[in-house]
Image (spheres, rainbow, N blue to C red):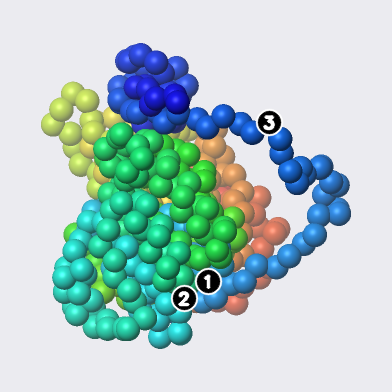
């Protein structure tokens, strides 16, 4: 019988190597290879029954999947409308950000709806979970707590109790007794994910898996873990702050990119149904270095405040810091300002921040970033009630952005009365009552719209 062999496996891509190397030959990352034990493969059976044959796509039977709301509106939104029978969901985030809290709250709501939940805790004892549930005001006979880390025991308990929903917290703490590798290693995570996928698809049980993240913010373990599951959710935000953003990075049963906004209180995570109200304060125009833009996340539009601090540097190399937006994009926008508009900021430190802990990666934030920098540099506030939406090209031209009408309607709902937009977007936007649209061709045209 073949015996397990020692290999070196990349923590980033999962590629195995017979010897240690400084650089992974698969993904090119440095210092990611760690010792791992590879279990022997079972010999393939020479005979197969029930072979499948390729069929035309048009002849594949279409079946609708069962979806059920979990009782938390923002979580249902991110999941695409609710939990799907037989789905495997992975949720990750920084320590203390609220992963276990929202899972316990979800289990409580599902229990009230008559669904049985098995909460498998590999990091906290049953007593600790009880203390957490008391703080959250959760008590239910339909939530079973099972403090176990051995994969085979967990599998047997699921087969015995037949719950509707399984929550595993966390996958890095679970290990299979059949593998000679520590918990959290690539082989253990791969084996655990495979078994959980088999349980979800084979029995129709909804499985939620909590995952740790690395210092770079990615879920620890092989990337295969994210490819294997049906849905990947990430918690964003500062664990020391009040607001949390739950983002769907991948969703086979809904739209990826959807976000849910929560506020952390002493009684747990509470939904924020109007995110625009927490990301802005007033209609702007009060202090310099501030601009407001309307962004799109999934199917939702809301307004956020972009702040900029411009101060004379005391160093030979000025600092460029971007919080919540792309750091490299900030450098590009400053170069465009200098080259195309004659605004020189090479002797100034510049800090740009998206208020409220929000992260905006779309290029439509370019104009708001530039306007906040110009406002902070000239010490002139933006005109009150003005939003800035537009992408800036390397030539200084303002390029069109998508979903412009949805953005403007959200700005009107929040009380804004004017908008700086690219001229190329003007024809695609119907007239909005109470909103004055100012079309800009070039970034230098924006200089005249500071109060």
User: Label for residue 90?
Assistant: none
Give the mark, 3 or 2, whose residue is nearer the N terminus. Answer: 3
Residue 325: x %, y % from top left: 38, 46
> Which residue in the protein does label 3 denote?
46
**What residue is at 38 percent from the left and 64 percent from the top?**
157
Quarter in which the N terminus is drawn? top left
Mark 3 or 2, which is nearer the eye? 3
**Residue 195, placed above or below residue 343:** below
**What residue is at 68 percent from the left and 31 percent from the top?**
46
Q: Is residue 302 left or right of residue 154?
A: right
**Residue 161, placed above or below residue 9:** below
Give the mark, 2 or 1, whose residue is nearer the N terminus. Answer: 2
**Residue 110, placed above or below residue 370:** below
Is residue 433 visible in this depiction of the protein?
A: yes
Residue 190 lies in quadrant? top left
Give the mark, 3 or 1, whose residue is nearer the N terminus. Answer: 3
Residue 377: x %, y % from top left: 29, 45
Assess whether mark 1 and mark 2 are in contact (beta carbons under 8 angstroms): yes
| Cα gap from disc 3 to disc 2, whole angstroms | 46 Å
Relative to the observer, which residue lies in front, 284 or 252? 252
SS state under label 3: loop
User: Label for residue 70?
Assistant: 2
| Cα gap from disc 3 to disc 1, whole angstroms | 43 Å
Quarter in which the C terminus is drawn? bottom left
Residue 38 lies in quadrant? top left
Q: How many marks?
A: 3
Is residue 293 visible in this depiction of the protein?
A: no
SS state under label 2: loop
> Which residue in the protein does label 1 denote?
82
Q: Is residue 403 left or right of residue 60?
A: left
């Amino acid at each position: 019988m073949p015996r397990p062999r020692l290999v070196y496996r990349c923590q980033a891509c999962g590629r195995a190597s017979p010897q240690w190397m400084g650089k992974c030959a698969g993904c090119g990352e440095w210092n990611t290879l760690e010792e791992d034990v590879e279990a022997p493969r079972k010999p393939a059976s020479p005979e197969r029954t029930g072979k499948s044959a390729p069929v035309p796509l048009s002849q594949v039977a279409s079946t609708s999947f069962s979806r059920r709301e979990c009782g938390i509106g923002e979580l249902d939104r991110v999941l695409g409308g609710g939990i799907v029978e037989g789905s495997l969901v992975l949720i990750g985030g920084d320590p203390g950000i609220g992963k276990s809290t929202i899972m316990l709250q979800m289990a409580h709501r599902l229990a009230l709806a008559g669904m049985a939940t098995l909460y498998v805790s590999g990091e906290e004892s049953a007593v600790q979970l009880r203390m957490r549930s008391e703080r959250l005001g959760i008590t239910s006979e339909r939530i079973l707590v099972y403090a176990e880390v051995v994969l085979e025991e967990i599998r047997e308990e699921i087969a015995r109790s037949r719950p509707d929903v399984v929550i595993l917290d966390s996958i890095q703490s679970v290990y299979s007794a059949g593998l000679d590798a520590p918990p959290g290693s690539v082989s253990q995570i791969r084996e655990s994910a495979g078994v959980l996928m088999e349980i979800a698809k084979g029995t129709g049980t909804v499985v939620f898996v909590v995952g740790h993240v690395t210092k770079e913010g990615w879920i620890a373990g092989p990337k295969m873990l994210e490819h294997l599951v049906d849905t990947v959710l990430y918690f964003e935000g500062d664990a020391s702050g009040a607001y949390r953003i739950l983002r769907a990075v991948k969703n086979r049963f809904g739209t990826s990119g959807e976000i849910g906004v929560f506020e952390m209180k002493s009684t747990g995570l509470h939904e924020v149904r109007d995110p625009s109200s927490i990301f802005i304060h007033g209609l702007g125009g009060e202090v310099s270095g501030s601009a407001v833009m309307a962004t799109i996340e999934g199917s939702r539009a809301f307004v956020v405040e972009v702040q900029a601090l411009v101060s004379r540097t005391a160093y030979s190399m000025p600092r460029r810091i971007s919080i919540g937006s792309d750091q490299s994009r900030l450098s590009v926008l400053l170069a465009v300002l200098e080259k195309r508009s004659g605004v020189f900021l090479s002797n100034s430190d510049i800090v740009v921040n998206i208020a409220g802990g929000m992260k905006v990666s779309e290029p439509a934030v370019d104009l708001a970033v530039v306007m906040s920098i110009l406002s902070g540099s000239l010490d002139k506030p933006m005109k009150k009630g003005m939003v800035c939406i537009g992408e800036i090209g390397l030539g200084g031209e303002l390029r069109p952005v998508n979903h412009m009408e949805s953005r403007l309607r959200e700005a009107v709902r929040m009380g804004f009365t004017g908008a700086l937009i690219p001229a190329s977007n003007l024809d695609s936007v119907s007239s909005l009552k109470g909103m004055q649209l100012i079309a800009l061709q070039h970034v230098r045209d924006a200089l005249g719209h500071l109060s």
